[in-house]
Amino acid sequence: MTTPTPRLLPLASDGCGCCAPSAPPAATSDPAMTIADATPNPLATYQVEGLACGHCAGRVTEAIRVLPFVDDAQVDLAVGGVSTVTVTGAPSPEEVRQAIEEGGYIVLAS
């Protein structure tokens, strides 16, 4: 009897240093944000500096989730570096940037 080989799960993040090297964000009209999908629930990513722990990440996700037209917000935390905040939905990029910056964090322009 042979044991079937289990399928490998997709990587949760391509920005994780142990799984894959980080790629620089694609250039758009707002360099701090990239649109990953043009479907009704688009993804926008923001490069954020200053997030130091899970508590910081939680504060940012909660501040973004209460904005109009946000379906979800996730943080790929890079302690001591640049973290990636992914927002699902169609909120105003200015409102997302303001919510992050009001928490004391820096949204990078490039």
Image (cartoon, rainbow, N blue to C red):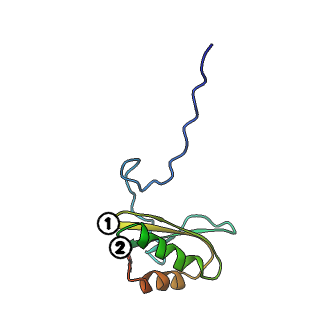
Q: Residue at x 44, y 70 (%)?
A: 57
Q: Secondary structure at mark 1?
A: loop
| Residue 67 in which image quadrant | bottom right
Determine whether, in the image, residue 14 is placed left or right of residue 65: left
Residue tagged by mark 1? 81
Determine whether, in the image, residue 70 is placed left or right of residue 59: right
Residue tagged by mark 2? 49
Q: Secondary structure at mark 2?
A: strand
- Circles 2 and 1, Cβ within 8 Å, touching? The answer is yes
Q: Residue at x 53, y 85 (%)?
A: 95
* In the depicted structure, whether residue 25 falls above or below residue 64: above
Q: Quadrant of the C terminus?
A: bottom left
Return the disc, 2 or 1, that comes first in the chain's sequence.
Answer: 2
Where residue 77 appears, x then y in whole percent? Answer: 41, 63
Identify which amino acid the numbered label 1 is placed on.
Gly
Where residue 40 appears, x then y in whole percent? Answer: 69, 69
Determine whether, in the image, residue 52 is placed left or right of residue 31: left
Where residue 109 appears, x then y in whole percent? Answer: 39, 78
Identify which amino acid the numbered label 2 is placed on.
Glu
Give the alpha-carbon distance from disc 2 to disc 1, as whole Å: 6 Å
Mark 1 nearby-residue class (10 Å; few <14, some 14–19, many ≥20): few
Tally of numbered discs = 2
